[in-house]
Image: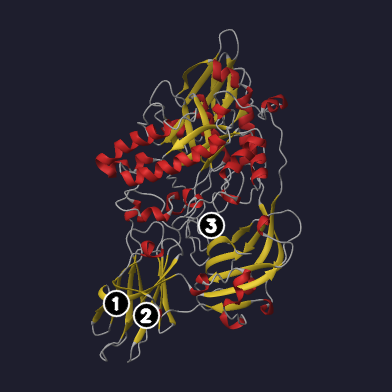
Amino acid sequence: MWPSLIAKAKEGGVDVIQTYVFWNLHEPKTWRGRGRNDVVGFVKEIQAQGLYVCLRIGPFIESEWTYGGFPFWLHDVPDIVYRSDNEPFKFYMQNFTTKIVSMMKSEGLYASQGGPIILSQIENEYQNVEAAFGDKGPPYVLWAAKMAVELQTGVPWVMCKQADAPDPVINTCNGMRCGETFGGPNSPTKPSLWTENWTSFYQVYGGEPYIRSAEDIAFHVTLFIAKKGSYINYYMFHGGTNFGRTASAYVITGYYDQAPLDEYGLIRQPKWGHLKDLHAAIKSCSTTILEGVQSNFSLGQLQQAYIFEEKGAGCAAFLVNNDQKNNATVEFRNLTFELLPKSISILPDCENIIFNTAKVNLEGNEITRTSSQLFDDADRWEAYTDVIPNFADTNLKSDTLLEHMNTTKDKSDYLWYTFSFQPNSSCTEPVLHVESLAHVASAFVNSKYAGSAHGSKDAKGPFTMEAPIVLNDEMNNISILSTMVGLPDSGAFLERRYAGLTRVEIRCAQQEVYNFTNNYEWGYQVGLSGENLNIYMREHLGNIEWNEVASATDQPLTWFKIEFDAPKGDDPVVLNLSTMGKGEALVNGQSIGRYWLSFLTSRGQPSQTLYHIPRAFLNTSGNLLVLLEESGGDPLHISVDTVSRTGLQEHASRYHPPQQFYSVQGLLLDNLTV
């Protein structure tokens, strides 16, 4: 999809593609740099289309990406403290940063070598957590900056949200309103840069989508330029999909679908087109902005003018109306202008308005879904119910509750906690009480499902599950499945974060309580049996016995499989999972991400029902779909569909930039990128 996405960004007036570098993708254990991990190939594709690159190496990136981009093996380095003046961490951070820079240098990809990379980033929003590290924070900032600069890329380095970024590293702004909130560069020799202009906001399971209007984005972009801003990056211009297990804690699989290019890479109007017009308008007066002297003065109580003027040459003006509700009539250079509420008008000649941020000249285009195949034939499906491990089945034993992430090493979302228990005859109406700092807990008593509970992104502290259970007089096997829906991605001391069960009790009606939290022998299994047997891969389907699907649709921990043909045409392909509960979907062995339909928003709707299957994952026919359903769902009503957007027609108006202003759309300005 890279060539198409980059081309659409370029068509929309974008000059630079900005990307993080994902350490845990490239080096989960050994180096992986091919296919979707080919960062060099990605940069070269951008270069081939005549655009430039900002390479945010990090290597901590946050980004709603599992573990903030760190590979989990870093957790097991002795005495390590992430993102601190800590020698073990600095050793591995420097190794990774140096490797990425060396890869780019060897291909001649820095602008100093004639390549497309014009900026690099070291660290990421560190000032948000710096105070937590005490006297180990400031020296780390100085070391990171010095280490990066000494790699001699020949292009500037930036630190976002780091007001004291040491020279020559440039401090930059992240947010939605940097024209209003940014304190500016910390040196007069540095430009004003905005590395993340949030076009929307990421969405979590149980959360509603955040809608940011095209008008609001355009207003703040224009204000930043009017205040001498020289670089603005949209986060995200295209968000894409968190395939596999890459999304961080509680973050949905679709990422920034509300961006100008939606999750599938389709143009979202009016956002894409309105910003395209804005970019063209700014570029039409770019020489004046770059070479002119800026001044500003009041036009009214809530109105302001920003002017760029060259001696005896050009003049460009930005007329700002900060009144949220009312039009404003202003006098500027002996001319009268009517300014729309909360808007900025661009006058490339200080006389004629060619663009107003609040005047949208395009119709919105809604997503259209076309059903291709409904999987309603039970005879086409096969199912396998996963094995519930008992204490005797487990090889890993401990007399305490183990921490989830340190036990799984991020090899799986799942960790089984098991123990055996024989109650006293006096225990009536037993209730299993579980407290957990993971994300989901599901209980099984003697291999029968007993109940489940889950946390949420906003909840602080452990969540609680209380499930009435039935116990035998003899020995009982209690199996509790702890589930992570992505690892945490932010916060100080990430290496110390705790997940998993924190308290387990069986409470009886007579107030008798059996506490298994400490000094009790537990057995553990990492991952599900089907997961460990790779039964989602065609070559491993025979590792278990598949059965008819009819009796398994409401069973937890069930795998379903079916084959299907790819929809005809070129439209993006989606899997409609609206009748499923929670789990993961895999196509031809490729995970298209986690799903969690049973976690409803405040409006009673799932956060995401459609899951993107890139056509590159598909064969013409005989595609294998495997679903891991954790809580019980109905696969007989899911479907494979295609999606498209219509209504791309632009509408002319007096605010629409004249055609000649589009002629400079492909230019990269020396100091100004949008």
Mark 2 or mark 3, which is nearer to you? 2
Please give the label number shown on residue 187: none
Amino acid type for the residue under numbered disc 2: Phe
- Determine whether 609 is above or below 128 in the image: below
Q: Number of labelled discs?
A: 3
Q: CA distance from mark 2 to mark 1?
A: 9 Å
- Where does label 1 land, which residue? 521
- Determine whether 536 is above or below 112 in the image: below
Which of the 4 image quadrants contains residue 249?
bottom left
Label 2 with label 1: CB-CB less than 8 Å: yes
> In front here: 489 or 347?
489
- Where does label 3 land, which residue? 253
Q: Earlier in the sequence, mark 1 or mark 3?
A: 3
Mark 1 or mark 3, which is nearer to you? 1
Q: Is residue 634 visible?
A: no
Q: Residue furthest right?
A: 568
Apparent side of residue 248 relative to residue 272 in the rendered image (left or right): left
Q: Earlier in the sequence, mark 2 or mark 1?
A: 2
Q: Position of residue 570 (x, y in %)?
A: 73, 53
Which of the 4 image quadrants contains residue 517?
bottom left
- Determine whether 103 is above or below 602 in the image: above
Amino acid type for the residue under numbered disc 1: Glu
What sort of colour scheme is used for the picture?
secondary structure
> In front here: 300 or 62?
62
- Determine whether 539 is above or below 246 in the image: below
